[in-house]
Image: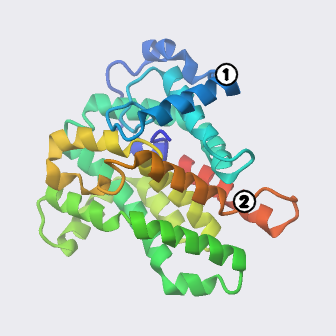
């Protein structure tokens, strides 16, 4: 999963277009506008290559820091999508957010050229925005009041329970906070929250995303936000992003990646995909289960566009 989430949030990090992200760049990456058509057989081969890479963190898959050609990233994205069950929720969510990848890729490339992984201030702002949104998500996941608000809806309660189980392995908020305290040079959470608030003042898209998550009323909706915010680390390029951030921040500034890097990458990825396919199934269009399936899919699409 390439880091495609919340492309409009990233716009707020820099309104200036860097050299090389103009018309000539668009012509060079014309496949951004015309997705490469790949046969199932070819995608299976790509997926097999990725499996062969195993736990080698130096191997290139879809990462938030990729500077690979657009068509290669598309092929890797499609190969990752194929790992989900046919007609399953993982594939549906991946396909739902795919249409938003063009702008996100351009912005990601622009940010890397501007210094996302070489300029601590740019990286700090990027991390701050996603910390703020993720914090809202995890507050909801841990909220007893939110769980009670679901009433006796067994499907919603099951989805929430599975997301919470995933959280026991991956909750990111405290890890974000350790990194941001280092980057902001503060020693307390209260000081950090003041800095985060100041950073978000001129990040309207980040505040909007934060508010959308805060106002979510179902576990299905939360699942869509989690797919975008956590999937990029677990299924995507958490290990590669860590390698780049490590050079700039040192060991004390890459805590957010600690549960998604290192040995076991393929097992983590497969566990996430299997859990996702188990949240809901596409059955009869009038069934409750199908409604939950559609709700998660639509929430993923919405969160990608925020």
Task: Tell me: residue 272, above or below residue 177.
Answer: above
Q: Residue at x 70, y 61 (%)?
A: 295
Q: Position of residue 262 (x, y in %)?
A: 31, 48
Few, some or many C-alpha atoms within 10 Å of disc 1 (few <14, some 14-19, many ≥20)?
few
300 relative to 131 in the view: left or right:
right
230 relative to 84 in the view: left or right:
left
Q: Nearer the viewer, residue 222 or 24?
A: 222
Marks 2 and 1 sit apart, C-alpha to C-alpha, by 26 Å
Badge number at residue 95: none
The reply to whether callout 2 and callout 1 are in contact (CB within 8 Å) is no
Q: Nearer the viewer, residue 99 or 62?
A: 62
Q: Position of residue 136 (x, y in %)?
A: 43, 69
Taking the image as drawn, is residue 216 in sight?
A: no
Q: Position of residue 207 (x, y in %)?
A: 43, 60
Q: Position of residue 60 (x, y in %)?
A: 39, 30
Report the colour scheme.
rainbow
Q: Residue at x 46, y 45 (%)?
A: 266
Q: Secondary structure at mark 1?
A: loop
Q: Residue at x 57, y 52 (%)?
A: 273
Q: Residue at x 51, y 52 (%)?
A: 228
Few, some or many C-alpha atoms within 10 Å of disc 2 (few <14, some 14-19, many ≥20)?
many
Q: Quadrant of residue 68?
A: top left
Badge number at residue 37: 1
Task: Tell me: residue 3, above or below residue 152.
Answer: above
The residue to which callout 2 is attached is 293
Q: Quadrant of residue 80?
A: top right
Q: Earlier in the sequence, mark 2 or mark 1?
A: 1
148 relative to 86 in the view: left or right:
left
Q: How many marks?
A: 2
Taking the image as drawn, is residue 117 in sight?
A: yes
Q: Secondary structure at mark 2?
A: helix
């Amino acid at each position: 999963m390439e880091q495609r989430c919340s492309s409009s949030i990233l716009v707020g990090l820099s309104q200036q277009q860097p050299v090389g992200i103009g018309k000539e760049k668009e012509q060079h990456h014309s496949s951004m506008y015309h997705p490469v058509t790949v046969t199932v057989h070819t995608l299976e081969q790509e997926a097999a290559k990725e499996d062969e890479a195993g736990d080698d963190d130096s191997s290139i898959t879809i990462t938030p820091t990729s500077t690979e050609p657009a068509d290669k990233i598309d092929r890797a994205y499609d190969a990752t999508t194929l790992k989900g069950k046919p007609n399953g929720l993982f594939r549906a969510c991946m396909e739902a957010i795919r249409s938003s990848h063009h702008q996100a890729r351009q912005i990601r490339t622009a940010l890397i050229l501007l210094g996302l992984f070489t300029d601590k201030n740019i990286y700090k702002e990027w991390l701050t925005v996603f910390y703020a949104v993720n914090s809202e998500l995890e507050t909801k996941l841990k909220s007893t009041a939110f769980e009670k608000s679901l009433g006796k809806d067994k499907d919603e309660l099951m989805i929430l329970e599975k997301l919470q189980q995933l959280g026991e392995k991956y909750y990111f908020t405290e890890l974000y906070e350790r990194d941001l305290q280092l980057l902001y040079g503060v020693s307390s959470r209260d000081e950090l929250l003041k800095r985060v608030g100041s950073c978000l003042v001129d990040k309207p898209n980040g505040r909007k995303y934060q508010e959308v998550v805060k106002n979510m009323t179902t576990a299905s909706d939360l699942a869509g936000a989690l797919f975008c915010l956590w999937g990029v680390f677990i299924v995507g390029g958490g290990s590669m992003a860590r390698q780049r951030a490590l050079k700039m921040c040192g060991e004390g500034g890459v805590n957010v990646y600690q549960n998604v890097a290192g040995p076991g990458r393929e097992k983590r990825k497969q566990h996430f995909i299997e859990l996702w396919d188990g949240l809901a199934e596409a059955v009869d269009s009038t069934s409750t289960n199908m409604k939950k399936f559609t709700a998660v899919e639509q929430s993923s699409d919405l969160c990608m566009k925020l």
